[in-house]
Image (spheres, helix red, strand yellow):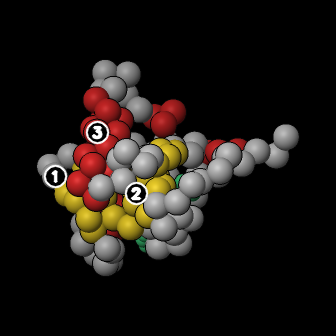
Amino acid sequence: MSTIFHKIINREIPADIVYEDEHLLAFRDIAPQAPVHVLFVPKVDVATLNDLPRGQPELVGRLALAAADYARREGFAEDGYRIVVNCNGDGGQTVFQLHLHLLAGAPLGRFGTTL
Ligand code: AMP
């Protein structure tokens, strides 16, 4: 499976990369929904949260820790932030490589619902 995020991981298209390690890449969202909007993406292929291997819960844990570390480094951990993982159609997922959104930099209000 190759998505636009795989192309970013493979440096085939550019992105504003803010963090990388052997397991994951983090870069700024191209259409930010908050003053800070960074995406944390694992380097292994996992299309959606439904596809997270049962034996690899650390895969999501690493994304969450990387996001919390980033928040601390950038100085907004205490003010707060939001982590979002969209899954499939009703969740609003548009890129089918698992990713965690980090949103911050202003009070974010309640998150959306159609109800
Ligand atoms: P989702 O809707 O949860 O699948 O989120 C996909 C996100 O990827 C959206 O917030 C898009 O704005 C973002 N996005 C799409 N293409 C790029 C890109 N080339 N670089 C950075 N972010 C992107």
The residue carrying mark 2 is: 39
Q: CA distance from mark 2 to mark 1?
A: 14 Å
Q: In front: 9, or 104? A: 104
> Which residue shows up at 57% across the image and 55% down it?
107
Q: Nearer the viewer, residue 76 or 48?
A: 76
Circle 1 — which element?
Answer: loop
Is any atom of residue 71 visible in this view? Answer: yes
Confirm or reject: label 1 Cβ below 8 Å from ligand 1.
no
| Residue 41, x across and y down, in percent | 35, 52
Of pointers 2 and 1, the one earlier in the residue sequence: 1
* Label 3: element kind: helix
Identify the residue shown where x is 31% and y is 78%: 14
Question: In the image, what residue type sits under mark 3?
Answer: Leu
Residue corresponding to mark 1? 21
Say which amino acid is labelled 1.
Asp
Q: Is mark 2 within 8 Å of ligand 1?
A: yes
Element at label 2: strand
Residue position marked by numbered label 3 in the rendering: 65
Instruction: State if disc 1 and disc 2 touch (CB < 8 Å).
Output: no
